[in-house]
Amino acid sequence: MLDQAFQALADPTRRGVVERLCEGPASVSELAAPFTMTLAAVVQHVQVLEAAGLVRSEKIGRVRTVQVDSAGLRSAEEWLAARRTRVERDLDRLAALLAEPAPEPSANAEE
Amino acid sequence: MLDQAFQALADPTRRGVVERLCEGPASVSELAAPFTMTLAAVVQHVQVLEAAGLVRSEKIGRVRTVQVDSAGLRSAEEWLAARRTRVERDLDRLAALLAEPAPEPSANAEE
DNA sequence: CAAATAGTCAAGCAACTACTTGACTGTTGC
DNA sequence: GCAACAGTCAAGTAGTTGCTTGACTATTTG
């Protein structure tokens, strides 16, 4: 599912749709309005976002209302956060090691 | 650059490479080891990651050493965090509104 | 009821992606 | 110096993506 989430977010039109939906739910036509492409194309983008779990939608009458699914955003975000914090922690450890002149096992790093 | 970052992360092989690099820098051959594909293919994946700003690499002698670029990870993460927190804040406001029976302009929500 | 609205479906197409193969360029170790 | 090693380059290919068009299906609304 991360595959699909990141893939979905790689397209600027789809990120635009997500950004718009962060302001609140919208119909497909409303989502399509800012773009020059056809409605059918926007529908396809919404389907991609929905398959990726970034968005949910429900059709009432003839209008389909779309809204963000924050859980989808969160899972992508968490993957990134987990990796990044791990790297940065290691970099900090390295920096501390370089700052420390005496290589003693008992840690006591004062500037 | 977000386009390229998300696009890069959409591929499981490339996410695998990033995960491996979170443990520390590695040569291209080391990165390729866990995969069944050719070395040339892995080189191409590394190039995609580098173009996306998720990774940096330097060639010394005949070996190219690759490491994560946490700034790249962070910018993708920040895009997600900004959108998600905005949506969740709005959902919380809505929940509070629904919990409140009297629709008065002066807010005073007690459970 | 008829026309406009909101969206859906399927086919087609150009561009891009994720590979492979094979030939080639430097580098290191004996 | 020469073989093995680490990687690079370029071309080719099957499959995917981001559109479009045109025909079609509901659902309002006057």
Image (cartoon, coloured by chain):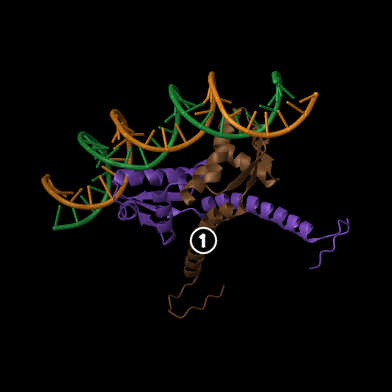
Chain colours: A purple, B brown, C orange, D green
Residue closest to the eye, A22 or B72: B72
Q: Residue at x 36, y 56 (%)?
A: A26
Residue closest to the eye, D25 or B25: B25
Q: Residue at x 55, y 75 (%)?
A: B110
Image coordinates for residue A34, horizontal then vertical, percent = 31, 55
Q: Residue at x 43, y 47 (%)?
A: A11
Within 10 Å of the Cα at label 1, are there few (<14), some (14-19), or many (20+) other Cα atoms?
few
Up the image or down, B38 lies above or below A76; here it is above
The answer to whether residue A76 of the structure is visible from this angle is: yes
Where is residue A106, by image quadrant? bottom right
Residue tagged by mark 1?
Answer: B82
Where is residue B18, by image quadrant? top right
Image coordinates for residue D19, horizontal then vertical, percent = 31, 42
Q: Please name the amino acid that badge 1 sits on.
A: Ala
The quadrant in which the C terminus of chain B is found is: bottom right
Image coordinates for residue B109, horizontal then vertical, percent = 53, 75
Up the image or down, B21 lies above or below A111; here it is above
Up the image or down, B7 lies above or below C13; here it is below
Q: Is residue D11 left or right of residue B43?
A: left
Chain designation of label 1: B
Q: Is residue A101 left or right of residue C17?
A: right
Q: Is residue A106 left or right of residue A51?
A: right
For mark 1, give the secondary structure: helix
The answer to whether residue A5 of the structure is visible from this angle is: no
Residue closest to the eye, A14 or D12: D12
